Amino acid sequence: MLRNLKAEMARADVKGKDIAEFLKVRDATVYDKLNGHYAFSFNEALAIKRRFFPESELEYLFDNQEKKSA
């Protein structure tokens, strides 16, 4: 799951539908990728970052590692 991307989407009021329209894919495809069923390609990730979140780091947005408590 892409928690950071989802959080930034909420802050910026960017919907999965907005990303789907931008990438020219189905809404369901974007939601599947946001929920970790499939991965965004590098080119998709870079395009999303540049279009919607230019101030954020690519690695931050697409970090899908679960944080483990010590």
Image: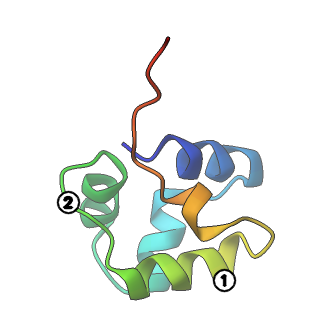
Furthest-right residue in this view: 55
Q: Secondary structure at mark 2?
A: loop
Say if mark 2 contacts mark 1, CB within 8 Å.
no
**Residue receiving disc 1:** 50
Name the N-terminal-most of marks 2 and 1. Answer: 2
Spatial separation of the CA atoms under disc 2 and disc 1: 21 Å
Q: Would you place residue 61 above or below residue 45 in this image? A: above
- In the picture, measured across the screen, residue 16 lies left or right of residue 29, that is right
**Residue receiving disc 2:** 38
Q: Amino acid at mark 2?
A: Tyr
Furthest-left residue in this view: 37
Image coordinates of residue 36 in percent, x first then y, are 27, 48
Q: Secondary structure at mark 1?
A: helix
Residue beneath the point at 44% across and 47% down: 2
Furthest-top residue in this view: 70
Q: Quadrant of residue 15?
A: bottom right
Q: Quadrant of residue 42?
A: bottom left
Image coordinates of residue 3 in percent, x first then y, are 50, 40
Badge 2 density bin: few <14, some 14–19, many ≥20, Cα 10 Å: few
Residue beneath the point at 81% across and 70% down: 55
